[in-house]
Image (cartoon, rainbow, N blue to C red):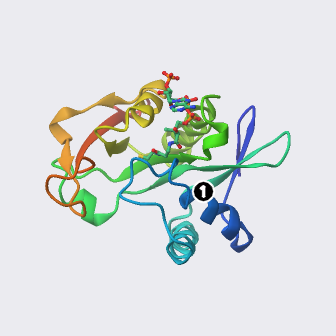
Amino acid sequence: MLQTTRLNLRPWRTSDADAYAALQGDPIVRRFFPAPLRREQAEADLAAHMDKFATNGFGMLAAELKSTGDFVGLIGIGRVPDIIKSVIPSQPEIEIGWVINHSFWGQGLAPEGATACRDYAFQTLECPEIVAFTAAINTPSQRVMEKIGLTRAPEDDYLHPRIPEGHPLRPHVLYRMKNPAGS
Ligand SMILES: CC(C)(COP(=O)(O)OP(=O)(O)OC[C@H]1O[C@@H](n2cnc3c(N)ncnc32)[C@H](O)[C@@H]1OP(=O)(O)O)[C@@H](O)C(=O)NCCC(=O)NCCS
């Protein structure tokens, strides 16, 4: 469990299935993804987060408001999936990411939670670097990257291997930050 001023960040539970499916099934939240997730896709996605956490000991986490217990979304770190890593020249290892329920947008919750995850990656896991990536047209997510101290790395921009040629979501941008404690 990680804590910030307003958030608890914790591993996923099977009882999160309804909240997770509502988050990832929302076309507003998923406007920079190819499509909202159907219920069975969301359940598979949630199971994958739980598996990865069990394997790696870290992962994407459930974010809840401390004051009310409301489910806010997903914030966390993970291993860059091989299919993405294979198309990025620098072959990054650890990514940081976020998906916030749209009723909570604009309150700085993503950067607040992501700052705690960034610090965990650098101080506890001693990762030499973290990256974040998103569709080039997803400027709100790029603002979060900037707010937590990541810097655009245009040399690592890439075309998403699972999105067809000509699709507006295919061009992706990458941001990175080196561990300040590193040499
Ligand atoms: C990107 C996202 C995580 C930002 O979370 P947040 O908690 O609202 O973060 P912030 O409050 O710091 O806002 C960040 C930016 O989001 C945008 N934003 C904020 N409120 C918004 C709203 N109500 N409507 C549209 N965009 C909004 C702004 O560009 C803002 O930048 P600014 O603070 O410089 O104006 C959130 O919009 C989201 O979950 N989007 C959908 C999922 C997604 O794209 N995830 C990233 C995948 S790589």
Residue at horizontal 49%, vertical 40%? 122
Give the residue furthest to the front.
27
Q: Which residue is mark 1?
A: 23
Viewer-proximal residue among 131 and 174: 174
Viewer-proximal residue among 110 and 82: 110
Viewer-proximal residue among 130 and 7: 7
How many numbered marks appear?
1
Seen in the picture, residue 36 relative to 117 is either above or below; the reply is below
53 sits left or right of 88 in the view = right
Q: Amino acid at mark 1?
A: Leu
125 sits left or right of 12 in the view = left
- Which quadrant of the rendered structure holds the C terminus? top left
Residue 52 rendering spot, x and y as whole percentages: 51, 69
Q: Quadrant of residue 83?
A: bottom left
Residue at horizontal 17%, vertical 56%? 87
10 sits left or right of 49 in the view = right
- Neighbor class of circle 1 (other Cα within 10 Å; few <14, some 14-19, many 20+) is many
- Note whether ligand 1 is within 8 Å of mark 1: no
Give the residue furthest to the right.
68
Seen in the picture, residue 113 relative to 53 is either above or below; the reply is above
Residue 58 rendering spot, x and y as whole percentages: 55, 59
Residue 62 rendering spot, x and y as whole percentages: 65, 55
Residue 118 rendering spot, x and y as whole percentages: 51, 39
Mark 1 secondary-structure assignment: helix
Residue at horizontal 56%, vertical 63%? 57
Q: Quadrant of residue 173?
A: top left
Viewer-proximal residue among 135 and 64: 135
Residue at horizontal 52%, vertical 47%? 28
